[in-house]
Amino acid sequence: MKILGIDTSGYANAIGVIDGDQILADLVFEARADSLEKIVANIDFALEKAGLTLEDIQGFGVGLGPGSWTGIRVGVTVGKVLAYGTGKPVCGVPTLEVLAYNAQGRGGLICPVISAGAGDTIYAALYRRKGGTVSRITEYYVGDVQGLSQILKEPAILVGTGVEAYRQRLKQALGSPDVEIEMKEDVPRGAAVALLAAARLERGQSDDVLSLTPLYLREFAARAMVNRYAQAKGKA
């Protein structure tokens, strides 16, 4: 399938075009105040580089975040408009999964980390390689760097935009001799978004173009806390 992937969740925006397992274009560019115009221009450039037109695209993948609240909304909106306008399906892909997929060739457990942009708060989750893709094996984590040790009990590769920002604090928090940690700064790639979306589309899965929304993990964390409190009250 010919898929266009978009991620605008961080300080770099990404657009990728694939045909099956072949990457035809994979662009990364700085997110700026004029990001919408830049995204549209780079979609045109990516399609030109791939030798395709928008009519050739069979589906769209969009990074859902977490990350920059404004940035994510721009990318998701662009993906939805393209899907609605062309009548082609769209799939939302969590940005943590995109980062894990980027690193899957490195083996072992993968822990993508994204800065929440508020003090010491990070977004994270733990993924394991499974065939040609990755699967999440923990709940999403939203909290401070120190608390990441709650989910990280085995050797793992840390990747993502939060790695460099918190490198020293991550080393201190995860400095157990039993847990070998490799850290690698990385940004989401549009081609990875497209490949993950293609895998879902090939299974007949897609998202409703009107109801698709970004993944706001702060809300996820709040709901989880309420549920845990309710369960604790029920046992009392």
Image: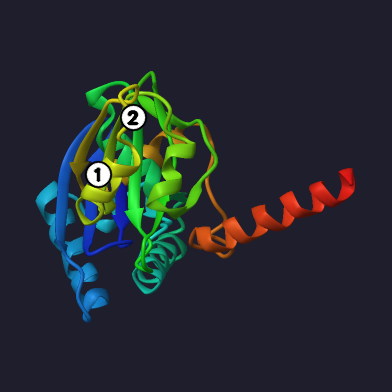
Residue located beneath label 1 in the image: 191
Local secondary structure at mark 1: helix
| Pick the front one: 53 or 122 | 122
Q: From the viewer's perspective, tell me whether residue 119 is left or right of residue 204.
A: left
Instruction: Kindly identify which residue carries mark 2.
Output: 176
Residue 236 visible here: yes
Q: Nearer the viewer, residue 56 or 145?
A: 145
The type of residue carrying mark 1 is Ala
Asked whether residue 1 appears in the rendered view, the answer is no
**Crowdedness near tag 1: few (<14), some (14–19) or many (≥20) residues, C-alpha within 10 Å:** many
Q: Is residue 87 left or right of residue 231?
A: left
Q: Is residue 91 left or right of residue 46?
A: right
Tell me, for residue 164, which label it has, or none.
none
Above or below, comparing residue 131 to residue 95 in the picture: above
Residue at 54% in and 60% down: 212
Choose mark 2 or mark 1, whichever is in front. Answer: 2
Disc 2, disc 1: CB below 8 Å?
no
Question: In the image, residue 10 lies at what x, y percent?
Answer: 28, 62
Identify the residue at horizontal 38%, vertical 46% (top origin): 96
Pinpoint residue 224: horizontal percent, then vertical percent.
Answer: 65, 52
| Crowd rating for badge 2 (residues with CA inside 10 Å; few <14, some 14–19, many 20+) | few
- Residue at (59%, 57%) from the top-left corner? 220
